[in-house]
Image (cartoon, rainbow, N blue to C red):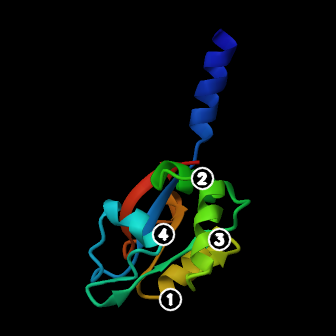
Amino acid sequence: MKLLLILCLSLSLFAETWSVVYVSADLKLKKSDLLNIYFKKMGQKNGVSIVALNLSASHPARRAFLQQVLGSNLHEWDLYYDQMYFMGVKTPPVLKSPESMLKYLSKVQGAIGYIPKKNLRQEYIELTSFEL
C-alpha cells in the first residue's frame, strides 16, 4: 500500500501541465467555446477567423486534451470527422510538435492550440489547462 502511494505521488510530481491558448485579444473566447471550435461549429468570432490546431493522434497531449478538455476521445473524434468529411468539413490542421504549435500560434491570428504551460508567453491568452 505504501509503495502504491509513493508511486502515485511520484507520478504527480512528474505530471506536466499544458495550456489551451490563443493570441488574438479580439476573439474574446471562453472555455465553453472550445467544443464548438474543435468540432467546427464555430469558425469565427468578432470578425476573426478561428483556426483550431492539433498535435498528431499519437501525441499524449492530444489524447489528454481530447479527454480532459473536450470530453471526447480519438475514436469519437475520428467518427465525427469521418461523417463531416462528406459534408466538406476537414479536420483541424495537425502539427508535428509543440514547437511547431508555438510557431503557428505566433504567426496566425485566430489560431488556438495547446502548449506546455512552461512555454506560456505574455501575449498568449489562456483558456484552460490540463494535465499530461
Q: In the rendered image, is residue 91 in sight? A: no
* Residue 46 sits above or below residue 124 on the image: below
For marks 1 and 3, the one nearer the N-term is: 3
Q: Which residue is mark 4?
A: 38
Rounded to the nearest angstrom, the CA distance separating label 1 from label 3 is: 29 Å
Picture residue at 47% right of the left edge, 56% below the top: 70
Whole-percent x and y of residue 23?
39, 78
Whole-percent x and y of residue 72?
54, 53
Q: Which residue is mark 2?
A: 73
Circle 1: element type:
helix
Q: Select label 1 or label 4 by which is in front.
A: 4
For marks 1 and 2, the one nearer the N-term is: 2
Numbered circle sitting on residue 107: 1
Q: Select label 1 or label 2 by which is in front.
A: 2
Rounded to the nearest angstrom, the CA distance separating label 1 from label 2 is: 29 Å
Whole-percent x and y of residue 46?
25, 85
Q: Select label 4 or label 3 by which is in front.
A: 3
For marks 2 and 3, the one nearer the N-term is: 2
Rounded to the nearest angstrom, the CA distance separating label 4 from label 3 is: 14 Å
Numbered circle sitting on residue 82: 3
The three-letter code of the residue at mark 1 reads: Lys
Rounded to the nearest angstrom, the CA distance separating label 2 from label 3 is: 14 Å
Residue at the extreme top: 1
Nearer-the-camera pick, 68 or 43: 43
Circle 2: element type:
loop
* Residue 73 sits above or below residue 91 on the image: above
Nearer-the-camera pick, 42 or 126: 42
Numbered circle sitting on residue 5: none
Picture residue at 64% right of the left edge, 20% below the top: 6
Circle 3: element type:
helix
Quarter of the figure with residue 58: bottom right
The three-letter code of the residue at mark 4 reads: Tyr
